[in-house]
Amino acid sequence: MDNIIKIGLFGLGTVGRGVYRTLEENSDIIQQRVGVKIEIKKVLVRSLNKERGISIPEERLTTDPNDLIADPEIKIIVEVLGGINPTLDYVLAALNSGKSVVTANKDMMAEYGQRLFKAAQNNNCDLLFEASVAGGIPIIRTLKQSLAGNRIEGIYGIINGTTNYMLTKMFQEGCDFKDVLSEAQAKGYAESDPTADVGGFDAARKLTILASIAFNTRVPLSKVHTEGITNITVADITSANELGYTIKLLGIAKERPEGIEVRVHPTFIPKDHPLASVGDVFNAVFVRGNAVGDTMFYGKGAGELPTASAVVADIMDAARDILRNVPGFIGCTCFKEKPVLDIGETYSKYYIRLKVADKPGVLASIALVFGNKEVSLKSVLQKEATGKTAELVLVTHRVLEQNVQDALMDIKQLSSVLDISNVIRVEGEE
Ligand code: NAP
Ligand code: HSE
């Protein structure tokens, strides 16, 4: 133990392989930086005979988690199995046997973070999870440590690579939603069930983790208002372009005196906003702190080596804490209980696309309903008029969401309104 720390790896898939490779290829600098050698003693897999594209001694592989959990020589467990069952049980068992845990598992951290932290604290262990949000981008350590002196006012994140890839292709090349989703799946960006990506749920899990850290309160996943990108059409993309916006799936978390806002939804942002230029499968997290001002962290949000970069840094931190005898040094940072606001209590600008009857007085009747609900309009565009129907594109000023929803309920009842085709929030403008 004096000059070597042995670790156990749960999983040798995409991320596990990257961790194995990085620990091998960078072993010299890792040893110099930590002060001891880090060695993988055992690896838990499902299948012992799989071709893995790396050279690993057969005797290091096992299908029995207890070969790692019950081994007193193993001080750190690296969990890159994924999912919740049986992973949560394995991780709890590892913590309860006094081992520090490094995980890339956003699903598990988003739903069971509190329980895992309790187990880590009870056993004086580290629980580190940098790779669970935005892959290779060091955002969790940044929020917990580098920006610790700030009150975080807001986080705006492109935290799902699949949907960013899809929106970029739809925007730049006019690609069709289905074709571009198949491409994202073929490239290995999407989750095994891509509903988690396109439905916004993957981003919601990551946002829950970020918001809980940024605002020092546990933000339940169920409280994150979540919308995906499945309703985005060519008409919305064209309108966004004409109005000077691009569309991104954003995870937004803000602290207001009344509570915390947490929401994931497609968002119009101005083309000159720093997040607008984040294309392809890249992720970026824009953080506004009351001391530092605006900051943005950019990089690859997924993939073998970018994700391994974050996991390996966590392993090194856990190893340093073991060497200094301070595991659990930076534990759970949810010190307070703050309310999470309902989506109706949030403020935004709104892009609203309507199909209406093409006749005099229609616009006036719609404007009247918005006015009655205190929704003030910034711009109105008539896009297409056939003589029978017309398409209207409205952009509001910053207003309360509940007022917009109430106005839309009334507008739906107007006989001249044929369809409320889409409603997308607009952010990033003062
Ligand atoms: P993966 O390629 O599917 O690999 C999973 C590994 O775990 C495989 O080696 C598999 O064994 C093993 N495994 C799964 N269930 C097992 C069980 N019950 N018992 C024993 N072994 C089991 O997954 P991944 O893409 O590496 O993702 C791992 C974790 O990292 C997930 O939580 C994911 O959300 C997170 N993550 C992934 C990325 C990314 O870019 N892939 C980025 C950020 C975070 P076999 O090989 O024998 O099947
Ligand atoms: N499916 C996820 C994404 C993988 O597209 O961002 C990384 O968590």
Image: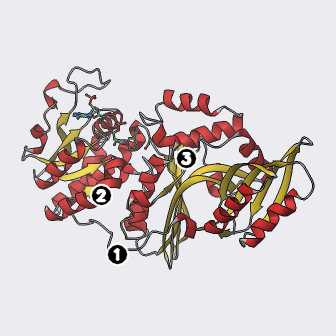
Secondary structure at badge 2 equals helix
Between the C-alphas of marks 2 and 1, the distance is: 15 Å
Residue 325 can be seen in this image: no
Q: Write the residue at 27% across / 61% down.
A: 114
Say whether residue 413 is left or right of residue 278. right
Three-letter residue code for mark 2: Gly
Mark 3 residue type: Gly
Image quadrant in which the C terminus is located: bottom right
Crowding near the residue tagged with mark 1, few <14, some 14–19, many ≥20 C-alpha atoms within 10 Å: few
Q: Amino acid at mark 1?
A: Lys
Residue 279 in view: yes
> Colour mode?
secondary structure
Residue ID for mark 1: 336
Place of residue 220 in the rendered image (x, y in percent of width and height, measured from the top left) = 38, 61
Q: Nearer the viewer, mark 1 or mark 3?
A: 3
Residue 113 circle label: 2
- Please give the count of numbered marks on the rendered protein: 3
User: Is the C-beta separation of discs 2 and 1 under 8 Å?
Assistant: no
